[in-house]
Amino acid sequence: MSDASVLTAADLGAANRSRLIRILHRDGPQSRAQLAAALGVSRATVTTIVQPLFDAGLLVEQEPADRASRRGGGRAGKPARPLWFSDAVLLGGAYISGDGVHCAVLRMDGEVVRETRAPLEREDVVDGVLAACGDFFAGTGLMGIGVAAAGMVDTEAGVILEIYRAPGFTGAQIGPRLGEMLGVPVVVDHHPRVQAIGDLWFGEGRELASFVSLHTGEVLGVGMVHHGRVLRGDRGAGGEVGHMVVDADGERCVCGRIGCWETVATLPWLRREAERAGLDDAWEMTCAALVARAETVPAAERLLRRYLRNIAQGIADLEQLLGLQRYLVHGDVGLGGRRAEQILAEELDGMLNRRRTLPLVTAVADDDRSTLLGAAGLLLSAAFSLDVDR
């Protein structure tokens, strides 16, 4: 057995801190006794687990609950003091895409204190993003900043390797430069992986042990969670599923390969096909717009099914490979709601081997919320080793 496969006491402590934070996000303020029961450890162990979080000011003890709500809380004669997140600690989150940058200041409980969006300055996209972040975060006492980048990222160096829709970011040292500018730690990761952290800690993934968080829209990408751990390749590789080939005789992708999933399952394809179908407002078409028109416009119903069949094709491939069973779909298809879920389920039913339970797809309409929350979680993961697969 290699050393890399051995969990140390430090790893176990980090894993338990991660679980504890997720329990608080999921269930609200909890006493030490409640946390001990949820984690399957002793009260003394809970005290050891939370001490670094107290030392950093992330957790505080609240006033004791009233007697009616004090079940299992404290020792006899001593009322329980629930643990909760401190309002004093602020976290920075930023999402950099081909359209611009979305910045937010968040509290530990996931509440967004304030946020802003800034479009890309096409002349110098890197300096434009850094200036927008600097202006927004300046003067705010932050624990640090988590950054989600919509492209390939070297997570160890904090460098954006490439964003196909914004080539000006190639090689951009966002992490080091932003950290130097603001004087706080900065952690950078691949956008869908950060989105998955947001789902895991704050969103639809809080109750799930394993799932795939899929981003749809101008591009495609996934973050994968296996038994509560976000999966990463070496130096942040992986998740670029938009560039897995689904049609060997298809179109050339922006990445240079032929027949990538992105060539048939993203908004550029959808809008081109909407124009061919003669649909109004074709170059502003979205999944939600198709859903709204599908009942009365046959061409919209046909295109909606083609689009979601192409989305389902990639999901089916991922399920054959990973078998994670749950798919949280964000972005354009997430805004398609229940109707998109129904069509995806129908398509997957015809694509996958029925010896196993079909995967469950959930449409998530959150307008970057999971990504911004995940950016805060990414920062905490780095600061407290909460994600032992990092």
Image: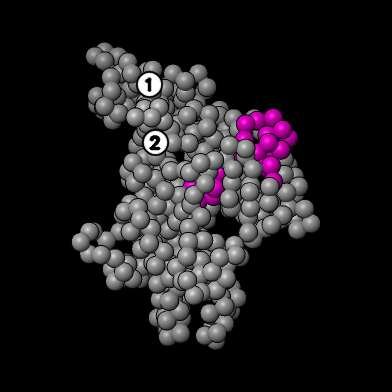
Q: How is the image coloured?
A: one colour
Q: Are marks 1 and 2 in contact (CB under 8 Å)?
A: no
Quadrant of the image occupied by residue 81: top left
**Residue 385 seen in this snapshot:** yes
Residue 76 inside the magenta-drawn segment: no
Residue at point 59%, 62% (across, down): 255
Q: Earlier in the sequence, mark 1 or mark 2?
A: 1
The residue tagged 1 is 9
Q: Nearer the viewer, residue 357 or 377?
A: 357
Q: Is residue 343 above or below residue 127?
A: below
Q: Which residues are magenta?
A: 172-195
Quadrant of the image occupied by residue 318: bottom left
Q: From this viewpoint, which residue is outermost toward the top? A: 77
Q: Is residue 126 above or below residue 157?
A: below
Task: Rate crowding at label 2 as few (under 14), some (14 to 19) or many (20 or more) other CA atoms within 10 Å.
Answer: some
Determine whether, in the image, residue 223 is placed left or right of residue 140: left
Residue 177 inside the magenta-drawn segment: yes
Q: Is residue 295 above or below residue 287?
A: below
**Residue 111 seen in this snapshot:** no
Residue at point 63%, 59% (across, down): 164
Amino acid beneath label 1? Ala
Q: Nearer the viewer, residue 246 or 186?
A: 246
Q: Compute the Cα span from label 1 to label 2.
A: 20 Å
Horizontal and vertical percent for residue 38?
28, 30
The residue tagged 2 is 22
Amino acid beneath label 2? Arg
